[in-house]
Image (cartoon, helix red, strand yellow):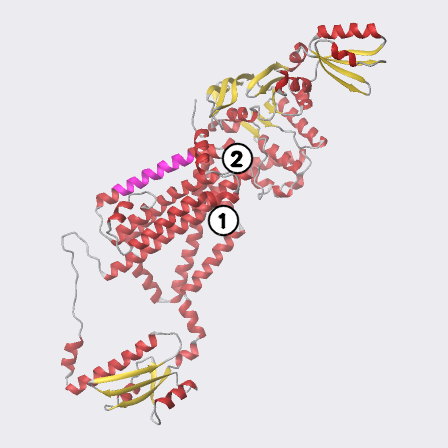
Amino acid sequence: MTNFWTTIAHTAGRRIKSKAFIFATISMSLLVLVLVNINNIIDVFSNESSQEKDTIAVVDLTEENIGEFLESQTESRFEYILHLDGDVDSAIEEAVNNQYNYVLTVRGNLEEIEAEFYGSGNDFMIAQEVHQDVQRVKESLATNELGLSEQELALIYTPIVFDEFPLQEGGEVQTMESHMQSYWMVYALVFAIYIIVLTFGSMIATEVATEKSSRVMELLVSSINPVTQMLGKIVGIGIAGMVNLLVIAGAALIGTYISGEDTFRFLIDVIDISLIFYALTLILLGYFVYGGMAAMLGALVSRAEEVNQALQPVVFLAMIALFISIFGLNTPDATFIQVLSYVPFFTPQLLFLRIGMGTIPTWEVILIFLILLISAILITILAARVYKGGVLMYGKFSFKEGMKQAFTLGKKES
Amino acid sequence: MTLVLNNIKKKFKDHTAVDTISLTVEKGEMFGLLGANGAGKTTSFRMILGLLDPTEGTVTWAGERLSYKRTKLIGYLPEERGLFPKLTVKEQLIYLMKLKGMKKPEIIKEMKHWLDRFQVPEYENKKIEELSKGNQQKIQFMAAVLHKPELLILDEPFSGLDPVNSDMLKAAVLDLQKAGTTIVFSSHQMQNVEELCEDLIMLKQGKAVLQGNLREIKRSYGMKSISLRADYDLQFLHSIPGVLKIEFNKNGATVKVENETVAEQIFRAISEKGFVRKFEVDEPSLHDIFIDKAGGDNID
């Protein structure tokens, strides 16, 4: 047991103290800090220009002089200026010469208003907002024309109350809010697992292969049980990775705090506390399933250069899981998602998807969790046995032959 | 505290690496494990260490199986040298010795002692990859003995060392033996084995071809070596049955014969022929025995 902790401390300590780790953690944290505050930073740079609204020359050809009403729209993002002297062509010419930003023509009467917008640049939202401005002016003119009172106006515009209830008692119904919450949580978790598998998996395998290629492995396994060593390595690298992630998460929190209340509230809206327990447990179990495989494959190669080749099966599994999950975000109740969520390599992502996005009976959650737990243990045992034999094997890497050979070598005989 | 290998056998698929060998090494003894490349030495060591389980037979130390619980009793110098290239001498000895159950202050004290003994105290904070091969070897040796093991296994400890370092290491090994450490070692350099070992086993394709006390082996070994100097051509000796090999050198010739009777025949033959300046019958060197026993298949 002491050796287990010694290995964890050695593995995690060496990693955390390494320059590459410190550099990566600090630069990632800074990046996150900047990204969270990106709005504030942009504001600082565009402070002056944001004071001035974009100007739009209005060529008014309507009977009701809509242009004048547009000009009085102070809430709009734009400043509408009536182009009195001249026609469309001269307005466009002046816009090209930078006297205005855009040009808008309105013609017809209240019953049938036609507007034309002349714009530039690549912000498609501009035309949409101008469209809304014109629509709003038209609506207020129309209600005016009809001579509606305040109460009558209120009657039209007050929103209705719309509530949702589950069909069965104890059932669930997805509201827009909870849907978005789960959607982002699932999305984030699926990506997190993918990235954890790729980076941590390759860290584990590389570490094992490096110790093998420097031949220090034989010395190590003469002092420490290879199985203990393997588990120590997996946990140690997990801890180093956690430190990395915690620092980045800390940076994100600090960043949110600096950037003000809005972002903070957005974050709280996005995170569903009840799902966090599931997320953490599934990440942990998934880490052991994939980490065990990575350690096993790392033990089969002789040189660090062969690690990527050996890791391919794991990477493919993680990629398949990622694609299925992203596809499944829109169809969480599809049969194939249900079936595949029982497969341990996909369980962490798909079970979370089903818990977060759809409805899943409790017994199924427990059953799938049990299957995942048992598979994690079985994979670790299998990995340990291959590992035990594999660390003493040198030669050309071949998955099939290597597995067979390592399996026999690791066999307990007495 | 005795190391006992009882009829151990290791099979890999259709190939038998070690075939039913038994040996006993008493406490404080220096035991030699010899054999050509691929004879099964490293596999035997790995079975003693518990890295591999024997297909048949048992390995015991002081009557019990060696397991990871008792790993601090054993020191191991593997044939393929390996340390962490990126770690300093101090860092890796601390890690490796912690795995043997030592505490940090103790490790540092012992490390300084050994670095001084090997006359390299300045290497404490150097990375392994910066050291020469011979000096890496010293650190590797330290990694095997720093925790004062009861049983020390040295797989080719002297290969790749210059004579000065080789002697330094040899002296260290002998000191450890005096202090009561049981040592099993393998070497290709027969001279080292003759200097250090009392008992030995010689393996060929996994089988023991020779086993016992070194002096007795040499005495009772049938083959003899005759140093000969005469004033005439000695080529005619080839015709005497039982002559294995004649090597001519500037001082005469060395004749290997099957047994003492053949030596007598040679003596008679040359005394008939003329004056003999030198005639000496020696026990064979371990080198000769090794080549005879573990060498090519033609002699079988």
Q: Is residue B105 above or below residue A132?
A: above
Residue at screen point 38% across, 87% down = A92
**Magenta stretch prevailing secondary structure:** helix
Q: Is residue A225 visible?
A: no
Residue at screen point 38% across, 48% down = A318
At label 1, which amino acid type do we have?
Ile
Front residue of A51/A390: it is A390
The quadrant of the rendering that contains the C terminus of chain B is top right
Chain part drawn in magenta:
A367-384
Q: How many marks?
A: 2
Q: Is residue B187 covered in magenta? A: no
Question: As drawn, is B265 to the left or to the right of A40?
Answer: right
Residue receiving disc 1: A16
Query: Mark 2 to mark 1: distance in Å?
Result: 30 Å
Question: As drawn, is A352 to the left or to the right of B290?
Answer: left
Give percent across and percent down for residue A362: 22, 45
Question: As drawn, is A239 to the left or to the right of A372?
Answer: right
- First in sequence, mark 2 or 1: give its number: 1
Q: Is residue B221 above or below residue A110?
A: above
Residue receiving disc 2: A394
Q: Is residue A165 above or below residue A11?
A: below
In terms of image quadrants, where is residue A201? Answer: top left
Camera-side mark, 2 or 1: 2
